[in-house]
């Protein structure tokens, strides 16, 4: 791991935001100085936090994800591979900070009618099922385009039977699963599985597309949840 590259990567992501907010502060917005100072302090903490987080991902998450993917394929039990894929997808989604933020906001806006626990469980269930489906695709050699087309056709059909508020939440649910916890682990898992399955080399096409499919799962799960709730 190159810590210098990680620091630069984080700075390239944060500095444009800080510069833009600073320009707005000096020209248009002009918020109280204590608010701006808090923003600068928060930005420094974000930089430090992201550097540590990305370092942890590179040191721990990516290698262990690839190793788990390789190890479960070597057992040559398809049901075990799919079950572990589902379990990892479910657990890593529950731990995803973006999912927690969305669920908390939905709970607050709905006045508790749509509880945080139900939203998190629905999103995690959708991700788990579709991670397992994505792993199955690797073994069956099914083109990912077919699965994405079928998935989004189902999404748009269900959208006609679901209240509008659930449609909006469902697409946000699909977006938050592409957060910093979920994506590295799922991608690494896919690389590990595809590197062993069929004797393929890591980085070939089968190791990609897991995140795309995993994002469809939460959308469908929340839409189905909305149909049954209403």
Image (tube, grey):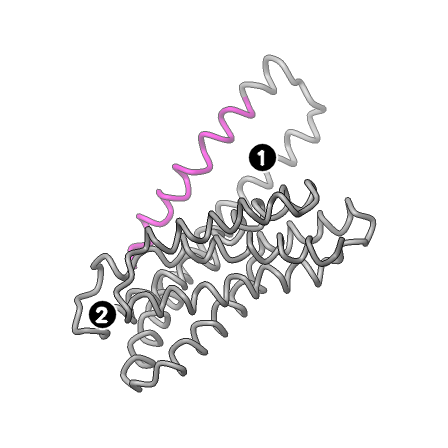
- Name the magenta segment's main secondary structure: helix
Residue at figure coordinates x 49%, y 52% from the top left: 179
Residue at figure coordinates x 55%, y 39% from the top left: 43
Q: 55 or 189, which lies in front? A: 189
Q: 157 or 69, which lies in front? A: 157
Q: Number of numbered discs present?
A: 2
Which mark, residue 40?
1
Magenta stretch encompasses residue 93: no
Query: Looking at the image, is mark 1 or mark 2 nearer the viewer?
Result: 2
- Element assignment for label 2: helix
Residue 29: x and y in percent read 65, 18
Which quadrant of the view contains residue 91?
bottom right
Q: Which residues are magenta?
A: 1-22
In this image, 17 relative to 113: left or right?
left
As displayed, is residue 11 above or below residue 152? above
Residue at figure coordinates x 62%, y 61% from the top left: 122
**1 or 2: tag closer to the N-terminus:** 1
Which quadrant of the view contains residue 194?
bottom left
Which quadrant of the view contains residue 27?
top right
- Element assignment for label 1: helix
Kindly give the residue lying farthest to the right in the view shown.
Answer: 111
As displayed, is residue 104 above or below residue 21? below
């Amino acid at each position: 791991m190159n810590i210098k590259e990680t620091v630069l990567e984080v700075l390239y992501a944060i500095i444009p935001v800080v510069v833009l907010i600073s320009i707005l502060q000096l020209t248009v917005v002009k918020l109280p100085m204590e608010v701006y100072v808090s923003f600068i302090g928060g930005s420094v903490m974000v930089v430090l936090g992201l550097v540590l987080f990305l370092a942890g991902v590179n040191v721990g998450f990516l290698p262990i994800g690839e190793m788990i993917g390789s190890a479960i394929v070597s057992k040559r039990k398809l049901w075990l591979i799919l079950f572990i894929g589902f379990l990892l997808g479910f657990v890593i989604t529950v731990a995803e900070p973006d999912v927690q933020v969305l669920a908390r906001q939905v709970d607050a806006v709905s006045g508790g009618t749509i509880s945080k626990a139900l939203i998190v469980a629905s999103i995690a269930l959708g991700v788990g099922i579709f991670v397992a489906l994505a792993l199955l695709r690797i073994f069956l050699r099914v083109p990912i385009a077919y699965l994405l087309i079928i998935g989004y056709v189902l999404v748009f059909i269900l959208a006609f039977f679901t209240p509008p508020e659930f449609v909006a939440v469902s697409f946000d649910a699909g977006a938050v699963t592409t957060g910093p916890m979920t994506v590295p682990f799922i991608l690494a898992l896919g690389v590990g599985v595809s590197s062993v399955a069929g004797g393929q080399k890591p980085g070939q096409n089968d190791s990609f597309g897991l995140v795309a499919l995993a994002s469809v799962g939460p959308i469908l799960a929340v839409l189905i949840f909305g149909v049954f709730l209403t």
